[in-house]
Amino acid sequence: MKGQMVIQKDQYIIPYDIATLSHFGVRNVKVKKWKIGLIATGDEIVPLKKDPLPGQITDTNTIMISEYIREYKVLTELYPITPDDPDLIAKQITSACENCDMVLVFGGSSGGSKDYTVKAIEKSGSVLFHGVAMFPGTSVSCGSVKDTPVFGMPGQAIASLITFFNLVFPMLKSWGVPIPAKKHVIGEITEDINPCNQFDIFHLVSTRYSDGKISIFPLEWAFGH
């Protein structure tokens, strides 16, 4: 009947919904779009197309996280690798915040002599927090620049991934990004995992189904610690 609702606001549109809208003569609908900017920092970081020299590291974090984000129908923009200079990082963050709904800055979030991300966020806007009680990912920071959330992501690949799933992921979901429900597996762990000073530990594992039970195998930290 005229005036009745066909599809609710904020609903993820599937092909069936498109057919339904077409049936009722709805040819145009407003849709939400999100874009996340990704910035790699560090004098030692080089782009994928360039072979790293001794002491250099290929930028894999922006590629890895960007691919995860795109799975959720969110646009990404990868900015040029920025050297260890707080002014340059701050300028890049400000520029990204003018065009993106969220910005992720990789590297420089710890407390070393060349860790400038937190200073850059503070220079461009304000810092909300720096450091959380989880491992890996302890050094993560978060701030606001031009009313845009900016995360200072750890430089290690696994720490960056854990941070994404535990902090960035829930924020995207709260925005209405169509993220599939989590899948849980219950099984028997094959070896002990030691505690880490009252920190919440997030450990990558592999699983194996055999003889009617699931075995869980903790993976080594080599790539992320």
Image (cartoon, grey):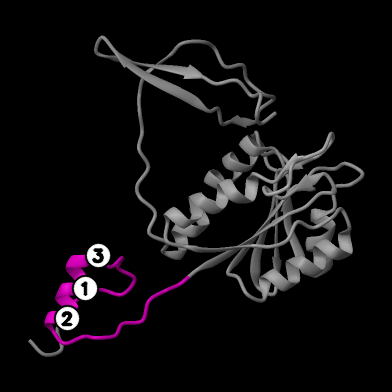
**At x 65% / y 34%, what residue is drawn?**
136
Which amino acid type corresponds to the residue marked 3 in the rendered image?
Ile
Q: Earlier in the sequence, mark 3 or mark 2?
A: 3
Instruction: Check the image and name the residue furthest to the right.
Output: 113
Q: CA distance from mark 3 to mark 1?
A: 7 Å
The quadrant the N terminus occupies is bottom left
Q: Which residue is mark 3?
A: 14
Residue 84, horizontal then vertical, whole percent: 87, 53
Which amino acid type corresponds to the residue marked 2 in the rendered image?
Ser
Instruction: Locate residue 92: give its quadrant.
Output: bottom right
175 relative position to 156: left or right: left
**At x 47% / y 57%, what residue is drawn?**
70
Look at the numbered disc 1 and give the secondary structure of its residue.
helix
Q: Which residue is mark 1?
A: 18
Q: Which mark is residue 113?
A: none
Which amino acid type corresponds to the residue marked 1 in the rendered image?
Ile
Q: Are marks 3 and 1 in contact (CB under 8 Å)?
A: yes
**At x 15% / y 75%, what residue is drawn?**
20
Whether 197 is drawn above or below 107: the answer is above
Look at the numbered disc 3 and give the secondary structure of its residue.
loop
The crowd level at tag 2 (other Cα within 10 Å; few <14, some 14-19, many 20+) is few
Q: Which residue is mark 2?
A: 22
Q: CA distance from mark 1 to mark 2?
A: 6 Å
Q: CA distance from mark 3 to mark 2?
A: 13 Å
178 relative position to 156: left or right: left
Q: Is residue 5 visible?
A: no
Q: Is residue 23 magenta?
A: yes
